[in-house]
Amino acid sequence: MHHFHSFAKAGDCVHNSSPLAMSGLNDNNPDVKVVPCSDPQADARVVGRADDTTDGEAECRKYPGAHSYFTYKRGSDKYLLCLTSLKPRPKLTFTP
């Protein structure tokens, strides 16, 4: 059975039901699904994909606007997706 996000590619939008990626942290156990970019659930747009690597720091520097990434690894199959957030990122400081 194919894992769905082997189909995620640049330009796709995704919803991550794990809160980690949305906090700007890098998430290596994401629960991500591809959704239409018009879907209110869309959290991020894929701006780049790199196969056979999980070095997101190096790869995602190539994509201006990439805020976060996630890596996918199963056996020898591995890749990462560089993401740009579509939602306002949570701020750590609150102004009254």
Image (cartoon, grey):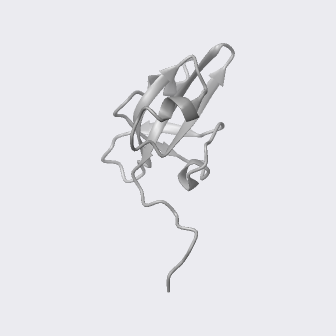
| Position in image of residue 74 (x %, y %) | 66, 20
| Residue extending furthest toward the left | 38
| Residue extending furthest toward the top | 76
Q: Which of 36 and 10 is in front in this view?
A: 10
Q: Which of 67 and 13 is in front in this view?
A: 67
**In the rendered image of this protein, does residue 96 appear above or below residue 2?**
below
| Position in image of residue 32 (x %, y %) | 53, 39
| Position in image of residue 40 (x %, y %) | 37, 54
Number of marks: 0
Decide if residue 24 is on the left or right side of residue 37. Answer: right
Please name the residue shown 50% across and 28% down the image: 5
**In the rendered image of this protein, does residue 96 appear above or below residue 51?**
below
| Residue extending furthest toward the bottom | 96
Q: Which of 5 and 94 is in front in this view?
A: 94
In the rendered image, the quadrant that contains the N terminus is top right
Decide if residue 55 is on the left or right side of residue 45. Answer: right
**In the rendered image of this protein, does residue 38 appear above or below residue 55?**
below
Please name the residue shown 49% across and 34% down the image: 60
Q: Which of 25 and 18 is in front in this view?
A: 25
| Position in image of residue 37 (x %, y %) | 33, 43
